[in-house]
Amino acid sequence: MFDSIIDPTLGPAADAQRAPATLADRPDSLSGLRLGLLANTKRNAEQFLDQVGRVLTEQHGVRAVVARKKPDITNTAPEPILDDLRAGCDVVVVGVGDCGSCSASAVADGIILEQSGVPAVVVCTDAFTASADAMARVRGVPGYHYLTVPHPMANLTPGGVRDKAAAAVPEIVAMLTSGAMAAAS
Amino acid sequence: MTTAADPAEAAGDPVEQAKDVIEYCYEQGWTDGLPVVPATSRGVGAFLATTPRGAEEIIGTAPHLGRSITVAQAAANAIMAGCKPDYFPLVLAAWEAVNLERSARGAWQSTSGPSPLIVVNGPVRSRLEINCEGGVFGPGFRANATIARAIGLIVRNGYGIRPHELEQATQGLPGRWSVCLGENEEASPWEPFSVAGGLEPGVDAVSAVLIRTCEYVDNRGTDDPVAVLTDFADTLARMGAYLGGGHSSGGLVLGPEHAQLFGRHGYGRADVQRWLFEHAVRDRADLAAAGKGDGPVGDPAQAGTPFPMMPSARDIPILVAGAGNAAISMVFRPFGWAPWSGRSVPVAWSRAPSGA
């Protein structure tokens, strides 16, 4: 009825919808694998991921850890960092999405790695599921499964970060190995 | 006039149809909560005629979202915001000025929920009836209200950054997407703000700072410039605005009375900036007591010295706006750690505007 109204959301033709993304196949276990940790600049993000790396090394047989930190919370990780992770890792943990921009961009990083064939788990705090879900839709993976941990992260003591990381490890292992993360239709 | 609710009659009534169009736009998710004016290709054509820029020129990109924004798309959103065609070159200049801000990249998804403070200088203020005087923060003036609103609709519809989705403002701020003010150059003792932004006087120009809030300083009982400066410094140094890690941020929209008081006593803009930088300080112990003692505040080499809350003298932007009827000014809080870009954007016209 109102066909003459211009849709203000339509950008240039080049901004075509992304094709649905395919996620990576999962290994049977983490034993003997190389783990990547992709941190952002948020407070406690590196400490959280380092602790995850320690537990996965000590208890799940990870043989090497490659830790990288991206410089920008809004955009996806720069290509050189993604290349390091693609080349040097069998699985990657991304985090921590505990702000408006970085929750969305963490999901984008995880999906980019998945599309390169690298299984990834994205960790966000549970305050940012709306933003994380919105980015998953933007990236062509509606319903993308990521790990939520209780908000907040930034005000935790070192002990609190260790506890939160330890509590997250079983689900991280399950998400990296179970094969349950089939691409959403 | 009939008052009967005859559906057949109502269907042919253009006023009823206009209401239906407004509802249709709501249903599409295109509005910021207020009604919008529908954009048509004829309307977009009228807007495009005011600018030398091409319809398909890209004026913004969000690579992480896979979205870009064209001039024509900005025009559609400016129409929806209620702009007149002659406002459109100002919308484009404001968009460019906003994107000069280093903090703009992550701003629209941020929990901080910042909003542009848009400043217009030059003769265009009178041609397009941009308010520079009483009630300058609005509402009540079409150009001021709709130019600011257009920027918000471009972000929402152009990038798809919508509240409770990709937009994650914890609280936002009063007046988000509604602050566009003309500098009251005629009441200012100093050169226009756009000259501080690198342009010649008399040039139509737009500047923008992303801000997290404004707070007033009411000081009408003294003619002592140092007393007034002391009052400003206290507000600038408020701890709550400090995020930790670097420094706080602040700027001033001086009411004409305060600006003229400084002018009468021989203070230039740079003198005011320097005084405020030197005096907007806090005891490091106070910041530590508030849980903000990490980073530069806790630097052992600086123990016992006051902590400067402002990044530098020149990074305290100062402009003049409002009515000359009371000694009231506004402190505003730039978003993030990056200072104002310091660059004003000249307005590019395809033809001389015909007036409002």
Image: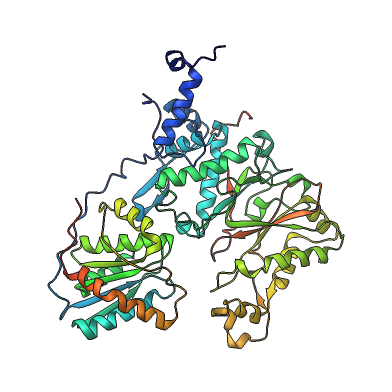
Q: Nearer the viewer, residue B308 or A1?
A: A1
Foreground residue among A52 and A65: A52
Judged left or right of residue A24, residue A55 is right
Q: Residue at x 17, y 70 (%)?
A: A177
Q: Residue furthest left?
A: A28
Tell me how many marks there are. 0
Residue B76 position, x and y percent, is 45, 35
Image quarter of residue B227: bottom right
What residue do we see at 39% from left, 47% from top? B160
Tell me the residue at 57%/38% (across/down). B146
Tell me the quarter of the image containing the N terminus of chain B. Answer: top right
Would residue B90 be seen by someone viewing this image from the given angle? no
Q: Nearer the viewer, residue B303 or B207?
A: B303
Q: Please say if B56 is above or below B169.
A: above
The quadrant of the rendering that contains the C terminus of chain B is top right
Percent position of residue B108, x then y: 47, 54
> Residue A19, percent across and down?
22, 49
Q: Quadrant of residue B310?
A: bottom right
Q: Is residue B104 above or below residue A61?
A: above
Residue at image position (38%, 69%) is A150
Colour treatment of the image: rainbow
In the rendered image, residue B351, in percent from the top left (x then y), is placed at 56, 31
Left or right: residue B113 compared with residue B61:
right
Asked if one can make out residue A146 in the rendered structure from this viewpoint, the answer is yes
Residue B222 vertical placement versus B161 (above, below): below
